[in-house]
Amino acid sequence: MKYLCLIYTDERVLQAMPEPEWRSLVEQCLRLRATLERDGMYLAGEALESATTATTLRVRAGKVSFTDGPFAETKEQLAGFYLIEAEGLHEALHAAAGIPAARLGSIEVRPVMSLAVGSTPPAQ
């Protein structure tokens, strides 16, 4: 089953990080990617630019609107993601615990829903 591991971090913490500490964090992320690839779990993953570069799009009553910045003001912003393949939630959580940014913020682990013609709405 596919799981999306969403990485949330306070961008101010990352921006205030000394360069050697930042480089170490990046190296840890690259090592995790290599481990996930070796274990056949890695499907995709990327770091994201600052939330200040985001544009939020909405379509209401057929009209498109754009807003600069993220959808909501929060302390932690979406900083990146890993898309992994895991046997189940336990394995996905174990893999997500290895994400270096978990020590700085939080990781949301969510199963990926398969959509197909005739799909039923998600359970509440």
Image (cartoon, rainbow, N blue to C red):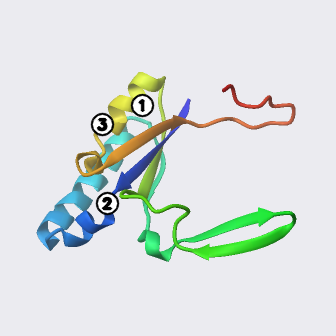
Q: Residue at x 35, y 35 (%)?
A: 95
What residue does disc 3 label? 97
The residue labelled by disc 2 is 10
Mark 1 or 2, closer to the camera: 2
Query: Up-down: is 62 above or below 32?
Result: below
Quadrant placement of the N terminus: top right
- Confirm or deny contact between disc 1 and disc 2 (CB under 8 A): no
Query: Helix or strand or loop: what does disc 1 sit on?
Result: helix
Q: Nearer the viewer, residue 103 or 86?
A: 103
Residue 57 placement, left or right of 87: right
* Numbered circle sitting on residue 92: 1
Q: Specify the amino acid type for callout 3.
A: Ala
Q: Amino acid at mark 1?
A: Ala
Tell me the residue at 19%/66% (across/down): 23
Q: Earlier in the sequence, mark 1 or mark 2?
A: 2
Q: Position of residue 118 (x, y in %)?
A: 87, 31
Instruction: Locate residue 102, reporting x and y percent.
Output: 28, 45
The location of residue 33, given as percent across then percent down, is 35, 49
Question: What residue is drawn where x is 75% and y is 38%?
Answer: 115
Q: Compared with residue 36, is residue 59 higher up or lower down, i.e. above or below?
A: below
Residue occupying the point 49% across, 76% down? 53
Q: Is residue 37 visible?
A: no
- Nearest the eye: 91 or 124: 124
Label 1, label 2: how far apart the Cα atoms are: 23 Å
- Residue 5 image position (x, y, % from top left): 45, 43
Give the number of the mark in front: 2 or 3.
Answer: 2
Which of the two discs, 2 and 3, labels the residue nearer the N terminus?
A: 2
Q: CA distance from mark 3 to mark 1?
A: 9 Å
Q: Which mark is residue 67?
A: none
